Image (spheres, rainbow, N blue to C red):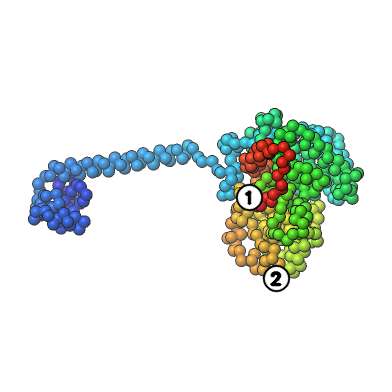
Amino acid sequence: MPKPLRLSDSKIQGFCFRTGKHALTKGKEGPTSNNAAFQQNKPPGTTALGRSCEKGTTNTDLNTTMALRNNILISSLYVSLSLLFLLSLIFLLLTHPTQPNPSSSSHYQISHPSTLNQSIKVFVADLPRSLNYGLIDQYWSSDGDLRLKSDEERKIRSTHLSKRFNFPPYPENPLIKQYSAEYWILGDLMTPEKSRAGSFAKRVFKVEEADVVFVPFFATMSAELQLGTAKGVFRKKEGNEDYERQRKVVDLVRGSDAWQRSGGRDHVFVLTDPVAMWHVRTEITPAILLVVDFGGWYRLDSKSSNGGTSDMIQHTQVSLLKDVVVPYTHLLPRLQLSENKKRGTLLYFKGAKHRHRGGLVREKLWDLLAGEPDVIMEEGFPNATGKEQSIKGMRNSEFCLHPAGDTPTSCRLFDAIQSLCIPVIVSDEIELPFEGMVDYAEFSIFVAVSDALQPNSLMRHLRSFSEGQRDKFRRNMAKVQPIFEFDNRHPGGIGPIPTDGAVNHIWIKVHQKLPMIRDAIMREKRKPAGVSVPLRCHCT
C-alpha cells in the first residue's frame, strides 16, 4: 500500500520538489531543459537548488517544505476566491435580468416603457369632435359605403343607431378598416392616464411641455366618406365635403401658436389612406406624416423632376428622414405557430389582376404564374366571402405573393404575416414599417421585378427553399406578429394598448426623429427675415 503524501517529505515517489521558476523535476534526471544554462554552472551531483536528489537521500529540507506549503496555500486561496467571484456573478445575473433592447431585431418586441426610462410627450391639438369621432357617427348613421355592403356592418349599424357612443366603433368595411391607425393612435391618447402605464406616448396638456403635437383629424375616414358617397367630386373642391374638412383642419392648425412656434415641424398627421388630405398636402409638408408608403406621392415627385430620367426621387413632401411608415391594419385573424398545419400549396395570391401604375407588374406576374402547378391566383374582392377564401388560402400555402398594385405595398402583406404565410415581395420601391426594429429578410423573400418576370425564375427560386428554411421563416414571423397589431380589444379603442404593439412602435419611431426636428426648428428661428431655404432632395 503506497505511503500517503506528506508535506514534510522533500523527496516523494522519486520526485524532488522545488520552488522558484521550475517547480518540479524528476529524481536522478536532473533539471529540465529550460534550466540548462543554469545547470552548466552548478556543482556536480546537485540540483538547481544546490541539494542532492540522488537515490537514497532522505534529508528534510525545511525551506523546500515551507515553499511547497506556501504554494499549496496560495493555490487554495486562488481557487476559493475564484469560486466566490463566480457565485457572486451568478447571483447578480439571477436577481438583475437584462431587459431586451427595443430596437433589436432579434427580440422583435419593445420593453415595457417604464424600464426604458423613456417616453414621448404628446399634446393633442384642439379640434372639434366633428373632425374625428363625429365622422364615424356620420358613417354609422348613413346607409354606409355604397362600394361594399356587409352583414357585419348592418348589425353594428342597428346597435349604434339605438345608442350613442362617445367613442364609436370603427367601420368593419375592409376598404376603410385597413387604414384605421388614426383611430387606435387617438384612442390610446384619449384613454385615462391610469390605464396608460404601457403606453410609450405620455399625453401632456400644455403645448410648451410637448415634444410633438398630434393632430386628431381622421383624414382617412373623411376621404372614404366622400369616396363612398360621391366619388365623382373627390378631386374637385366645389361640392367636396372632404375638401371642406381638410381646409378647416389646416386653417385651425396653421393658425395656432404651436404651429407658428415650430413652423409645423413637430406636428403629427396620420395619412394612412394614399388619398388622405389630397388637396392640402403642400400646406402640411413640414409636419411628421404617418403613411403606409410613399405611393401617393410618386406622381407628384415625377412632375417636380420636370420630366427628368434620374433614378433619384426628390420627395419634396415626404421622406424617411422626417416621416414614419406605419403598418396597414390586418384584416385576417392571427394564426398562432402552435396551430400551424401542413400546407399543400406552394404560392398563393388573391386580389384584382388589373391595376394601374405599379399594378402592371401584377398583371405580368399573373400571366406567368396562373398555369403553374402548386400555384393559386384568385380574383377577389374583400367582402365576407373573399375574407374566408383568403384565410383558407393563406393558411394552406407556403408562400404568399405580394406584388405592387396601385401603391408599392398593401394590407395583403400584413395578412400574410398574421397567417404565417411567407411573404414574397416583388415591389422594388417598397418601404416597410419599423425597419431598424424588424429585419424583414428573416421571414420574407425579396425578389427584384426584373428577376420575377423571367419565365420560371420565381418558381425555381421558391422551390429551392428547404422545409427547414421555411419553418425557420415561420418561427421568425410568429415573433413579429404582435408588432403589427393595432386593436387593443377595448370598446371604442379606449383602454390599455398592447405594450409590444403597433401604436407604441410608431411613437418610438417618432421619438427617434426628435433631434432632427429640433435642429430644423432652431435653424428656422435663426434665419434673417425674408430668407428662404430651397427644397432639397431627402436621399434615403
Crowding at dot 1, Cα within 10 Å, few <14 / some 14-19 / many 20+, comes out as few
Residue 497 appears left or right of 276: left
The vertical placement of 427 against 222, above or below, is: below
- Left or right: residue 515 compared with residue 158: left
Q: Looking at the image, which residue is at 72% across and 37% down? A: 529
Residue 403 circle label: none
Residue 97 lies, with reference to residue 428, above or below; the image says: above
Residue corresponding to mark 1:
435
Residue 130 vs residue 482, the one in the foreground: 130
Q: Amino acid at mark 1?
A: Glu
Image quadrant where residue 284 sits: top right
Q: Residues within 10 Å of mark 2 (few under 14, many from 20)?
A: few
Element type at mark 1: loop
User: How far apart are the two marked residues, 2 and 1, measured between alpha carbons?
Assistant: 31 Å
**Which of the 4 quarters of the picture holds residue 462?**
bottom right
Q: How many marks?
A: 2
* Mark 2 or mark 1, earlier in chain: 1
**Looking at the rendering, which quadrant does residue 511 occupy?**
top right
Q: Position of residue 201 (x, y in %)?
A: 66, 36
In this rendered view, identify the residue nearer to me: 438 or 251: 251
Q: Which residue is mark 2?
A: 455
Q: Secondary structure at mark 2?
A: loop
Residue displayed at 86% across by 37% down? 161
Percent from the top left, x then y, of residue 59?
9, 46
